[in-house]
Image: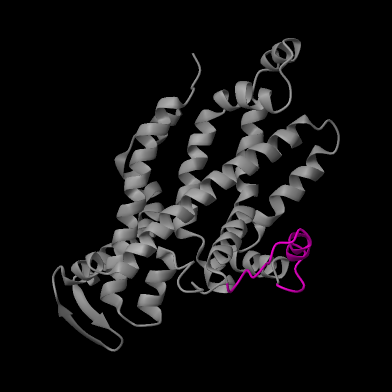
Amino acid sequence: MSTREIFDSRIESGLLLLPTLLVSVVFLYYPTAMAVRTSFFDSGFGGGDEFVGLENYAALVTDSGYHSSVLLSVLFAAVVVIGVIAVSLYLTFLIHEVDTGQGVYLISVIWPYALPPAVGALVFLFIAHPTLGVLTGPIEALGVDVDWFNDGPQAFVVVALAAIWKQIGYNVIFMIAAMNNVPDTLTETAELDGVSGLRRLVSVYVPIMTPTLFFLVVINTIYAFFSTFAFVDLLTSGGPSNATNILIFDLYQEGFSFFNFGVASAKSVVLFLVVGALMLVQFRVTDEYSYYGA
């Protein structure tokens, strides 16, 4: 019996898709619909919802603090995405050039990604500890006054570094696979022409890896907006003076600290639209420079 005959029945195909559809409806579509609905209500702790239409969205339009949070989130995402791609690409190249012990180096780079975000944040908290941190001492030895958690720009930097450090392993997994698929003839030709080191990475490997890099840019953008809550919560709690109050943490505070569920839902809808708009721009712009072969 052929594969086509097995899946020829629409009923059988539907039954196979049913578990996925149920999970999607219960954990994705229904919560999304409820968030959109709640954003039109004045909803707080204890019930008593009152329909207010677009008032929650209007409040966000006039909220200067929320505007700052949006700009901060876009800046944070840009720093994380660029930092993750650049560092991962360089580490991948170094690992690719190693002849022996490549597996050991891969495991060393990938293991932080295996940590849950909260655990990763706690590990980095000790790394950047003002007195005990292994990162703080060498920097202070250079004459730089380190005050990670009381200085706004430094707090932003430490959260961004933690987010980058956590995501490097995921990127290296895909990059090393893409780099290993670069034809050996291109590498040999580049070496014969005297192209070596970072120049070979930029001129030979990166153009061929563009589909993988494009995919990682999208994934890292989603990660920066949605999956960095634990780092902000455990490292800085959005401070000091809202210097690290990115959108995902801001809407969490609105909903679970201030119990303004209507406003928090409106913020979640706006966050979804912001990320969706960025995804659209990335698909239209970045895809033009992706190389998919002849």
Q: Which residues are the magenta region?
A: 130-150
Front-lying residue, 156 or 221: 156
**Helix, strand or loop for the magenta stretch, by majority:** loop
Front-lying residue, 69 or 163: 69
Quadrant of the rendered image containing residue 248: bottom left
* Residue lying at 60% horizontally and 72% vertically, measured from the top left: 149
Horizontal arrangement in the rendering, residue 83 relative to residue 254 (left or right): right
Magenta highlight on residue 139:
yes
Q: Where 102 sits versus 157, above or below?
A: above
Q: Position of residue 161 (x, y in %)?
A: 61, 57
Quadrant of the rendered image containing residue 269: bottom left
Q: Where 221 sits versus 152, above or below?
A: above
Horizontal arrangement in the rendering, residue 252 relative to residue 46 (left or right): right
- Give the colouring mode of the picture: one colour
Q: Where 219 sits versus 43, above or below?
A: above
* Residue lying at 70% horizontally and 40% vertically, measured from the top left: 91
Magenta highlight on residue 254:
no
Image mark count? 0
Q: Residue furthest bottom?
A: 46
> Is residue 211 something one can see in this rendering?
yes
Front-lying residue, 147 or 70: 147
Q: Position of residue 132 (x, y in %)?
A: 77, 72
Quadrant of the rendered image containing residue 182: top right
Q: Residue furthest front?
A: 143
> Is residue 31 something one can see in this rendering?
no
Q: Position of residue 125 (x, y in %)?
A: 67, 69
Horizontal arrangement in the rendering, residue 147 relative to residue 260 (left or right): right
* Residue lying at 34% horizontally and 59% vertically, measured from the top left: 271
* Residue lying at 83% horizontally and 30% vertically, measured from the top left: 99
Q: Position of residue 114 (x, y in %)?
A: 66, 57
